[in-house]
């Protein structure tokens, strides 16, 4: 029984927490409930005396996993918890004598990237940071002549030895440049893609001694003639320096080939073309060569063939169920001991296929991804038969899943992957599933939506093999979702009117444009849909909608997007008729902010609503019998960011609510007067939290689905925020209740003020500057031992911080070093308890 739905725009990292008051009243211990998988960012494999060793980098704080065949036949985390961060690149060294060395680029929660390496085949405990001299690495490429690295600062480095040998600078394109791709022909010849000016990407050939850069001429247009040329990656045929491929494009994936080392590009393919000119893959992210074949985005161009062949669907057996999965665009590697054997990223994690003599043969997911904790949970819903028996459904980037026999009081009821029917893709439609909703009056009816703008329904949702039917697709509604790739749309919310009528609402946003979206309703179980309208103009809603809150008396919508001028709330008081949404004025900053989440409750006629935005948390109240709303700001003052992603409220207690921001979860039991940090959230090792729903002690996060059990640890209290009562939206007056902040006992020298050595700072690219942060008390005493956190809130790739946390010395001071990586404007925030300071940082070219 879902109370709120929230999904923000084009972001694909979502988490979900489901909890009871007990879960938030004590510390918690997490137990995985049997959901395994991940979004695989990169794959590498190497020959270990005839045995193929496989490692993957995943889009999760767990970083790097290795396939273990020696004992457990499962995937093992080999960097976490020693190293916490997402792995975007991983390569096995191809230099003779160092084949057991593994390199990876891992980024921390601030987005800062570093190169780590293992000289023991990537085994746990062997990873070290080996390239601190390389600022902002973004690309790794392995070649027999060395291990190459490209950076966000436009530099190319090479290591010709092992993990103990240094990287040396080969060439620099200068500040303001970014290496997006690097392909090596030999020690003196390589090709790179360089981005400058934010979006302009140019292919270059580097050759000679010393290296000289020569720009290649870009193609004039895609094969179909539709749109502009969009390329980001490059690959040179290892057997012919003049055969070069370039590829890129999200709206229209495209590939170009030359056999002359430069223009003319003798062959081209794109998504918009048909026949032999069609490229069937998605957004190109790699180019791999093998035996006169080239692989791009799970598609292969074989020999002299002029057309591409796309990899097939895989089937895997999990317990007594068979699940089908799809290859993804993100990563591919070729078995060094069998070149017909291919490892590919899939929508579950990593699959194995064979390609030989022009024919694909699907094998299965490698080990059914057992042990990989990286499934990104997007949504969850349940239907209660009893306190020990519930229908439980999840939506994730890896598909939709149903627990076969879910008992919320027994974590072992779903502890194994065989306790799930997961992953499922309705009608084999492979995009990430963003929403799942069970009919509150019939658990056999389940609706799901995905990030291709499609909605499916099953009326056999209580069976072990649900049958699905498509009932909505965004491309049929270009008036709302736009004419530019409407199928690139998230279904952000699905909500049933609980009891007063048989109506279901859905909402969505086009993540390709960031400017389009809409709200639709159906009164016939999804057979037909009506686009909802705005009462001020009568026009249909055609802007991004991120969340819905559907009740028997009203429907609320939260809107806004990166390329949309629309912000704030939309409100529909006629739930079951044909009336329109209107735009209320709350008199608060809500009206000018992107709303990401809404949840509320009605108790004895009193309605309370909490709103999360990209600027804070707000609370609205309307007493029984009144039409007037009173709004106030209740943002937790200890939050290190105001980019809140979700709120949820206890349906039985309007004073008990929860808010998520970054990797933190905050709880209030007094209506927003004070907040406490929940469990292990806010720690460096905790994943981001994007969606909250109040019910059982469960958590769906960026790495899987977990149960919570008490370890009797008291939550960490945070400072009381200042609550700002705001003007009622309605002309009917209502007195704002007096909220009394909880006071903190005064210490010998209580932190009262924060000073930063400079209100703003300017640096040249490559320059390092110290910033001093000082904490004093109300009588100007010096606060020693205060913990100060530092975070880059804007321009994460432009600079690096020496530390994320420092402690003040006897002079009340802590020092942070800022290293400038590339030109632009950034912001750094320093925080100590309820004290915060933000400073702008301007970085210029020397």
Image: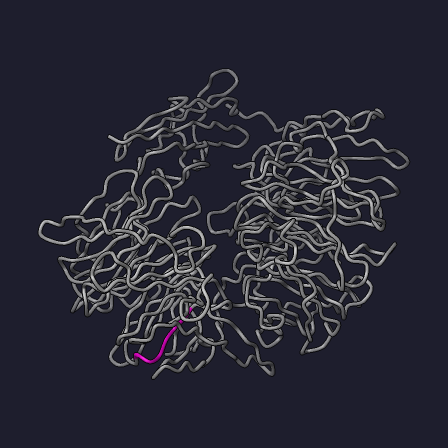
Q: Quadrant of residue 59?
A: bottom left
- Return the x and y of residue 373 as percentages of the image width and height: 50, 64
- Return the x and y of residue 505 as percentages of the image width and height: 74, 54
341 left or right of 163 in image: right
Q: Is residue 342 magenta?
A: yes
Q: Nearer the viewer, residue 228 or 703?
A: 228
Q: Nearer the viewer, residue 428 or 477?
A: 477
Q: Quadrant of residue 789?
A: top left
- Return the x and y of residue 187 as percentages of the image width and height: 14, 59
- Return the x and y of residue 136 as percentages of the image width and height: 31, 45
Q: Quadrant of residue 711?
A: bottom right
Outermost residue toward the front in this view: 225
The residues colored magenta run 339-344
Display coloring: one colour
587 left or right of 127 in image: right
Residue at horizontal 50 percent and vertical 67 percent from the top = 347
């Amino acid at each position: 029984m879902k109370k709120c739905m929230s999904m923000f725009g084009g972001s694909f990292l979502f988490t979900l927490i489901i909890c009871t008051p007990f879960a938030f009243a004590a510390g918690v211990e997490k137990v995985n409930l049997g959901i395994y998988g991940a979004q695989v960012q990169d794959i590498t494999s190497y020959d270990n005396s005839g045995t193929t060793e496989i490692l993957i980098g995943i889009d999760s704080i767990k970083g790097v996993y290795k396939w273990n065949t020696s004992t457990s036949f499962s995937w093992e985390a080999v960097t976490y918890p020693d190293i916490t961060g997402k792995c975007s690149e991983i390569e096995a060294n191809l230099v003779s004598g160092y084949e057991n060395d593994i390199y990876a680029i891992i980024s921390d929660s601030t987005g800062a990237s570093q190169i780590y390496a293992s000289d023991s085949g990537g085994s746990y405990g062997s990873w070290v940071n080996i390239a601190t001299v390389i600022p902002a690495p973004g690309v790794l490429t392995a070649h027999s002549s060395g291990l190459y690295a490209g950076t966000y600062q436009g530099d190319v480095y090479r290591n010709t030895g092992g993990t103990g040998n240094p990287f040396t600078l080969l060439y620099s394109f200068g500040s303001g440049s970014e290496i997006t791709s690097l392909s090596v022909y030999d020690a003196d010849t390589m090709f790179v893609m360089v981005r400058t000016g934010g979006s302009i990407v140019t292919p270059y050939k580097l050759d000679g001694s010393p290296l000289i850069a020569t720009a290649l001429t870009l193609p004039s247009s895609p094969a179909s003639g539709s749109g502009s040329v969009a390329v980001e990656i490059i690959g040179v045929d290892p057997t012919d320096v003049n055969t070069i491929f370039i590829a890129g494009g999200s709206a229209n994936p495209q590939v170009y080939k030359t056999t002359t080392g430069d223009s003319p590009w003798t062959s081209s393919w794109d998504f918009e073309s048909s026949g032999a000119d069609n490229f069937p893959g998605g957004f190109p992210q790699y180019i791999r060569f093998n035996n006169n074949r080239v692989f791009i985005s799970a598609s292969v161009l074989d020999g002299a063939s002029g057309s591409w062949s796309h990899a097939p669907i895989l089937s895997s057996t999990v317990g007594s169920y068979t699940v089908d999965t799809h290859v993804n665009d993100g990563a591919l590697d070729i078995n060094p001991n069998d070149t017909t054997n291919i490892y590919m990223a899939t929508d579950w994690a990593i699959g194995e296929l064979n390609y030989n003599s022009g024919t694909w043969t699907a094998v299965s997911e490698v080990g059914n991804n057992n042990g990989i904790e990286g499934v990104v949970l997007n949504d969850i819903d349940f239907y209660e038969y009893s306190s020990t028996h519930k229908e439980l459904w999840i939506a994730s980037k890896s598909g939709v899943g149903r627990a076969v026999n879910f008992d919320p009081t027994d974590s072992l009821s779903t502890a194994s992957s065989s306790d799930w029917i997961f992953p499922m893709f309705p009608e084999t439609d492979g995009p990430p599933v963003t929403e799942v909703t069970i009919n509150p009056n019939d658990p056999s009816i389940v609706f799901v939506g995905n990030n291709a703008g499609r909605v499916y329904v099953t009326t056999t949702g209580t069976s072990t093999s649900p049958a699905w039917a498509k009932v909505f697709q965004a491309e049929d509604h270009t008036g709302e979702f736009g004419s530019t790739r409407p199928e690139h749309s998230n279904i952000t919310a699905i909500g049933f009117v609980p009891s007063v009528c048989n109506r279901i609402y859905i909402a969505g946003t086009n993540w390709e444009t960031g400017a389009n979206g809409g709200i639709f309703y159906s009164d016939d179980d999804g057979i037909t849909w009506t686009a909802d309208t705005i009462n001020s103009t009568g026009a249909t809603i055609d802007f991004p909608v991120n969340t819905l809150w559907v009740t028997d008396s009203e429907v609320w919508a939260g809107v806004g997007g990166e390329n949309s001028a629309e912000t704030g709330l939309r409100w529909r008081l006629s739930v079951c008729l044909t009336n329109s949404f209107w735009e209320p004025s709350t008199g608060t900053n809500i009206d000018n902010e992107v709303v990401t989440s809404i949840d509320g409750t009605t108790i004895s006629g009193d309605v309370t609503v909490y709103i999360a935005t990209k600027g804070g948390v707000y609370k609205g109240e309307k007493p029984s019998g009144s039409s007037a709303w009173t709004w106030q700001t209740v943002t937790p003052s200890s939050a290190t960011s105001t980019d809140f992603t979700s709120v949820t409220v206890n349906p039985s207690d309007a004073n008990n609510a929860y808010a998520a921001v970054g990797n933190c979860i905050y709880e209030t039991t007094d209506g927003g007067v004070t907040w406490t940090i929940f469990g292990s959230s806010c720690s460096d090792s905790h994943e981001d939290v994007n969606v909250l729903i109040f019910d059982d002690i469960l958590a769906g996060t960026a790495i899987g689905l977990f149960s919570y059990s008490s370890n009797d640890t008291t939550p960490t209290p945070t400072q009381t925020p200042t609550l700002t009562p705001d003007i009622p939206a309605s002309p009917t007056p209502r007195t704002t209740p007096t909220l009394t902040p909880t006071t903190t006992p005064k210490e010998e020298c209580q932190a009262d003020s924060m000073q930063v050595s400079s209100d703003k700072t300017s640096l040249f690219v490559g320059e390092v500057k110290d910033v001093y942060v000082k904490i004093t008390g109300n009588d100007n005493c010096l606060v020693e031992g205060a913990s100060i956190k530092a975070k880059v809130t804007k321009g994460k790739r432009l600079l690096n911080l020496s530390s994320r946390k420092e402690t003040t010395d006897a002079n009340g001071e802590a020092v942070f070093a800022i290293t400038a990586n590339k030109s632009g404007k950034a912001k750094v925030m320093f925080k100590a308890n309820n004290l915060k300071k933000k400073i702008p940082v301007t970085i210029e070219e020397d």
